[in-house]
Amino acid sequence: MDIIQAIVYGVVEGATEFIPVSSTAHLYLVPYVFGWEKPPTEFTAIIQLGAILAVVLYFWKDLSSAATAWVKSFFGGPKDTIEVKTGWAVVIATMIISVVGLALHNYIEGPFRSLWVIGSSLIVMGLVMIIAEKRASLSRTSESVGRRDGIIIGLWQCVALIPGMSRSGSTISGALFSGFDRASAARLSFLMSVPAIALAGAYEGIKEIKHLKEANLVAPTLVATVASFVVGYACIRWLMNFLQRKGVVPFVGYRVALGIFVLVMCATGRWNPNPEMESTATPSTVAATTSGN
């Protein structure tokens, strides 16, 4: 992987991690579109840390106050403040996705990686987002968050373990179904994403640093992570304003169109939906499937 490719992956990750279109699906499709060799799983997991750093900086005040208040609540501090409730919601949601993620690990890294699954997931979550938007009462703010919301939105976050579903799409939808307004739904989605993605990225980084060195991917990984941070920060600022004005519906058309495109490419044999077979394809073979008439 050269530096240009690393920048592309970083930009794609930063641009799609928080917008409800599925960063996993887009990162997975990049090699098909450009005819590049598929990057290792640890590379795509680690570069998410750039996007998460963007969330941490953007919501630093919220995150730090929630974390501090939550810890102090165990040592005589107030137990019923907004910050403590937010902290509990984030902790509970993280525990849920951690348990479910470990239980489904073999499926997530195996059958769920099929392009059939990704294409279908893009469409299905798009339809769910429309329903959530139409049924949302928008009557709650993030100040009303509680432990029950941590359970509900945490379960919705687990849906994102299926590639193509989208972490932000599923958690924002879950928050909308729970009555939160759009800005609060986005805020909770961002806050709950931090521990899960950070833990996954750190785990892969520690576990696979030797492999990245052997594959000469340390520098590209760092470059992609920086690109992910810069683009991710810009996207957070943009999305917070956009969701308040337009909601999630504008993203649905893109998701459905992309999902149909992926399924058509698989059905016509132009893309190989089998991840195991695809990993053995050469870049030129993949490029041939995307350049034909």
Image (cartoon, grey):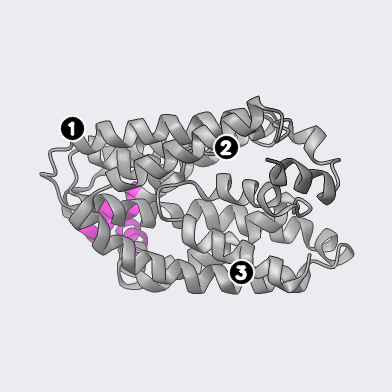
- Residue drawn at (78%, 38%) of the image: 278
In this orientation, does residue 133 appear?
A: yes
Q: Nearer the viewer, residue 21 or 291?
A: 291
The residue sitting at 33% across, 49% down in the picture is 88
Percent of width and height locating residue 130: 28, 35
Which sits earlier in the primary sequence, circle 3 or circle 2?
2
On screen, residue 214 above or below 193: below
Q: Which residue corresponds to mark 3? A: 225
- Give the residue type that dot 3 points to: Thr
Q: CA distance from mark 2 to mark 1?
A: 29 Å
Q: Secondary structure at mark 1?
A: helix
> In the rendered image, which quarter is residue 83 located in?
bottom left
The label on residue 101 is: 2
* Residue 203 in the figure: left or right of residue 20: right
Disc with the residue nearer the chain's start (3 vs 1): 1
Q: Position of residue 253 (x, y in %)?
A: 36, 41
Pointer 2: residues within 10 angstroms few (<14), some, or many (20+)?
Answer: some
Q: Quadrant of the N terminus?
A: bottom right
Residue at label 1?
135
The residue depicted at 51 percent of the width and 63 percent of the height is: 14
Between 55 and 38, the one lying in front of the other is: 38
| Circle 2: residue type | Gly
Q: Is residue 127 above or below residue 28?
A: above
- Looking at this view, is 128 or 47 the one in front? 128
Q: Classify the position of the C terminus by image quarter.
A: top right
Q: Name which residue type carries label 1.
A: Arg
Q: How far is mark 3 from mark 2, CA to CA?
A: 23 Å
Q: Earlier in the sequence, mark 2 or mark 1?
A: 2
* Depth order, front residue of 181/63: 181
The span shown in magenta is: 70-89
